[in-house]
Image (cartoon, rainbow, N blue to C red):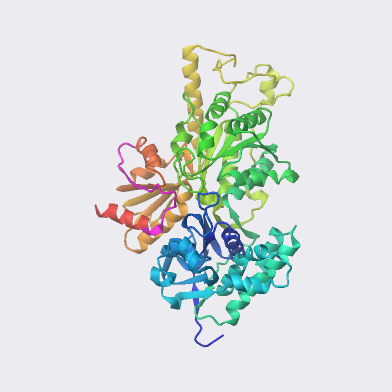
């Protein structure tokens, strides 16, 4: 390597892969992420899919992106990238705004012909000049031709060769960041295990990309990324949907219950169904039903029969499931409902992220229909909160809605595979033997402390019973239309949910606890808000930060925490739903709001600016 070549050492770096939706940007980004996680780096990803199923090739609307931040103290995928990989002019035009000043651009120059530039609506034949990009920061690589050269004797046709362009770009990026190829090759082997010829082709192209960067002594700098000293264990990267599926499996193991998923495919939740369908070896029963209503009803039937029952969906499907969920509330059966939120209303923005289903989760059923609502904070936290949702559902005999979102459901973080003993036993609320022996048991007999009714599995001798959607007598469990009894049952179901607060952790305050300003978030915005609070503190604006994973009931210390601060700010990806939820509980505390409803996650910079503006008022 030439003496002039620069090697930059960074604590973290952001790479954005971009190209047509068929160019394999998600695969290249995912492999780079997994390689980095295996080397001990923290990672955070943001897959940015186009909403169109398949827009015209080379068009602006068909651009697919994958952004990943790797290094130490990584909480978000980054506001802007250090390196932008653009496989065609449309990708460059759509994504150049995300590049940091002085960042590196890698382009497939073979894809920048006049016809390609016209498709991307460029007015001239010089895309770099038109966008004001300094050529000294651009690595113009003939990716297409070099891919063909590498596979000249492979026997593949031209179309199959071109599908390997993304892996050439991956090899080049691995060179740029000094990533070893062995881990990437292992992932390619897993991806193409049933297609050995395709695996060999991609392996050869990966090496060709790496060698190109090494051999041309490229003028752009390479990077050395610091990694953290991690707790001993097995590490991988995992996306939120996969983590959710695995958390459910852990909950089934810890509860001793068979796991049943009744679901219907819907973006962006379908991967949960896919992952659980693979796990027959662990006793999982995953059934693709004919529609959303059948999905929830099959899960309710499985719950009545004694299973850990789950149904998964997104916002439109949650609306369809609402009557079924109300049945589970009335019957007081455990049920986990997973909602991976996306932009709405109606079919809205299927591939984009929002937090706009909160009020639907809290209130979206007829009648007084209380249930528990929880929300994971990160992709890896999806494992823990899927476990928690299952624990609450089983131990408190209630439906629980798990509000994930497209950002953390599709995004990935580095994850240490846990040991089973790190998670507590889940204890189903079975009918006590003494109550069963007394002959006094009725379907709605309850534990006096928690108000949880006991779970009687059909087929158990002496515990034959019926439950359903009609109101029940509080003593006998028989159908009742008595108005006083109905009010008592409504209040009992409501109080049962409220008492879950005794069984969940208190909300924790992070960053500068003694500040006057408290920044609040919930669910998948954690990384951006935590990074923003830290940056505010570093810039001389002391800021405390509290993040909520338990929404209903709220943690027991919530009111005390909010009343402790002079200025309370809630930031969320909707028009203020959680702020409203808190405001009605603490009317004496004025809550400021930061809201974004663009189908995109927050940027740390915009959060910092918004908080500074509120503080200055």
Quadrant containing the N terminus in the rendered view: bottom right
Nearest the eye: 116 or 378:
116
Measured as percent of width and height from the top left, residue 25 is found at 57, 60
Foreground: 170 or 479? 170
Residue positioned most to the top: 482
Q: Residue furthest front?
A: 115
Q: Which residues are magenta?
A: 586-605
Residue 74 falls left or right of residue 457? left
> How many numbered discs, if any?
0
Q: Residue 579 vs residue 506: left or right?
A: left
Magenta-colored stretch includes residue 291: no
**Any part of residue 606 in sight:** yes
State the residue in front, 504 or 319.
Answer: 319
Q: Residue 141, image x and y in percent?
A: 54, 74
Q: Residue at x 46, y 55 (%)?
A: 527
Coordinates of residue 19 in the picture (x, y in percent): 53, 61
Estimate the x, y position of residue 380 in percent, counting from the top left. 56, 52
Image quadrant of residue 578? Answer: top left
Asked if residue 589 is among those painted magenta in the image, a careful observer would answer yes
């Amino acid at each position: 390597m030439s003496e002039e070549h620069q090697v930059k050492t960074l604590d973290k770096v952001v790479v954005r892969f971009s190209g047509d939706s068929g160019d394999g940007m998600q695969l290249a980004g995912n492999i780079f992420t997994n390689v980095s996680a295996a080397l001990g780096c923290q990672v955070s990803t943001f897959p940015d899919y186009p909403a169109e199923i398949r827009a015209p090739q080379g068009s602006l609307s068909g651009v697919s992106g994958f952004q990943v931040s790797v290094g130490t103290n990584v909480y978000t995928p980054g506001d802007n990238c250090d390196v932008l990989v653009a496989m065609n002019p449309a990708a460059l035009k759509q994504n150049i705004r995300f590049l940091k000043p002085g960042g590196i651009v890698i382009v497939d120059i073979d894809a920048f012909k006049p016809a390609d530039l016209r498709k991307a609506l460029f007015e001239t034949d010089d895309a770099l000049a038109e966008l004001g990009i300094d050529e000294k920061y651009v690595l113009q690589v003939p990716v297409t031709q070099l891919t063909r050269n590498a596979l000249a004797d492979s026997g593949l046709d031209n179309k199959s060769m071109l599908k390997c362009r993304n892996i050439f770009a991956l090899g080049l990026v691995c060179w740029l960041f000094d990533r070893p190829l062995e881990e990437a090759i292992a992932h390619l082997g897993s991806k193409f295990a049933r297609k050995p010829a395709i695996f060999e082709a991609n392996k050869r192209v990966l090496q060709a990309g790496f060698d190109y960067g090494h051999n041309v002594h490229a003028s752009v700098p390479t990077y050395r990324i610091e990694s953290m000293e991690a707790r001993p264990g097995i590490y991988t990267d995992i996306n939120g949907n996969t983590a959710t599926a695995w958390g459910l499996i852990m909950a089934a193991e810890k509860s001793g219950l068979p796991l049943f998923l009744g679901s219907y495919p819907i973006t962006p939740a379908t991967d949960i169904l896919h992952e659980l369908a693979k796990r027959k070896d662990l006793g999982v029963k995953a059934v693709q039903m004919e529609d959303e209503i059948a999905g929830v009803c099959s899960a309710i039937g499985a719950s009545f029969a004694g299973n850990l029952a789950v149904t998964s969906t997104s916002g439109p499907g949650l609306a369809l499931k609402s009557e079924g969920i109300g049945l589970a509330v009335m019957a007081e059966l455990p049920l986990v409902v997973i909602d991976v939120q996306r932009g709405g209303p109606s079919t809205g923005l299927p591939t984009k992220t929002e937090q706009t289903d909160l009020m639907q989760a809290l209130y979206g059923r007829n009648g007084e229909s209380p249930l528990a609502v929880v929300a994971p904070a990160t992709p890896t936290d999806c494992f823990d909160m899927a476990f928690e949702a299952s624990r609450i559902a089983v131990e408190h005999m209630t439906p629980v809605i798990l509000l994930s979102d497209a950002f953390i459901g599709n995004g990935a973080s580095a994850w240490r595979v846990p040991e089973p003993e790190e998670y507590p036993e889940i204890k189903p609320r079975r009918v006590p033997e003494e109550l069963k022996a007394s002959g006094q048991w009725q379907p709605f007999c309850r534990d006096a402390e928690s108000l949880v009714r006991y779970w009687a599995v059909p087929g158990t001798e002496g515990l034959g019973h019926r439950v359903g959607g009609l109101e029940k007598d509080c003593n006998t469990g028989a159908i009742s239309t008595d108005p006083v009894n109905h009010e008592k049952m409504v209040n009992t179901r409501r109080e049962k949910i409220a008492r879950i607060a005794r069984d969940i952790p208190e909300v924790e305050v992070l960053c500068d606890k003694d500040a006057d300003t408290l920044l609040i978030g919930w669910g998948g915005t954690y990384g951006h808000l935590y990074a923003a609070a830290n940056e505010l503190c570093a810039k001389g604006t002391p800021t405390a930060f509290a993040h909520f994973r338990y929404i209903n009931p709220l943690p027991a210390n919530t009111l005390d925490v909010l009343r402790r601060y002079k200025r309370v700010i809630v930031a969320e990806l909707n028009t203020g739903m959680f702020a409203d939820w808190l405001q009605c509980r603490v009317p004496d505390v004025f809550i400021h709001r930061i809201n974004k409803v663009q189908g995109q996650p927050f940027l740390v910079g915009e959060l910092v600016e918004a908080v500074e503006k509120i503080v200055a008022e």
